[in-house]
Image (spheres, rainbow, N blue to C red):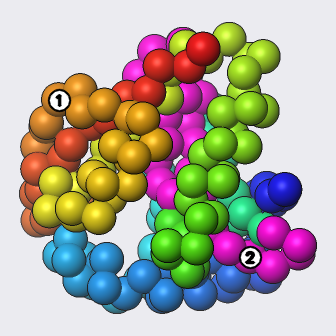
Amino acid sequence: MYTFAPIKDAETGAAALAIYEANAAYYQKIGEPRPTIQTVLDDAKELPPATPARAKHFWLVKQAGKPVAVLDLIEGYPDQTTLYIGQLEVATPRQGHGRAIIDQLKEQIGSHGYKRMELAAVHANKDAAKFWLALGFQLLRQVEGELSPGNQQLLDVYTLKLE
């Protein structure tokens, strides 16, 4: 069982940064600089246009009290029946945490009226594509997106219908 704690202070911010730093190869692959505490702070505030702040949940995911992942969720985006995964970053990939976190999330949101989950992953990140497809997500479309100023990337948008 995982617990979800808001990333809102120096301690949780530092734990999130450690997870980001464990994924240095990912940042290099997508053309982003090495993450810093400012990266975490920026991610904590980032929202799609016209989305209220109350819709955002930026969490440190823990198992037995140990930080294992960062999860960014946006309720009701791009529509009211969708839960959008803005980020899932696991400290130690290929240990089953990502799948288990998504499975737990699906169980917990089942009674909240969401009909699907959606996310976008950088097209160049083939490991992400394999992961999301293995969880039952389907490629919905591809779009151009700006990860940071000057870093345009092709993004794969995935969706999962919830039962």
Chief secondary structure of the magenta portion:
strand
Above or below for 109 versus 13: above
User: Residue at 89% across / 73% down in the picture?
Assistant: 64
The reply to whether dot 1 and dot 2 touch (C-beta < 8 Å) is no
**Total of numbered circles in the picture?**
2
Relative horizontal placement of residue 54, taking residue 71 as reference (left or right):
right
Which portion, as a residue range, is magenta?
63-88
User: Residue at 60% across / 14% down in the picture?
Assistant: 163
Residue 13 visible in the picture: no
Question: Is 83 in front, or is 139?
Answer: 139
Q: Earlier in the sequence, mark 1 or mark 2?
A: 2
Q: Quadrant of the N terminus?
A: bottom right
Quadrant of residue 34 within the rendered picture: bottom left
Q: Horizontal and vertical percent for residue 18?
A: 59, 87
Q: Residues within 10 Å of mark 2 (few under 14, many from 20)?
A: many
The residue to which callout 1 is attached is 141
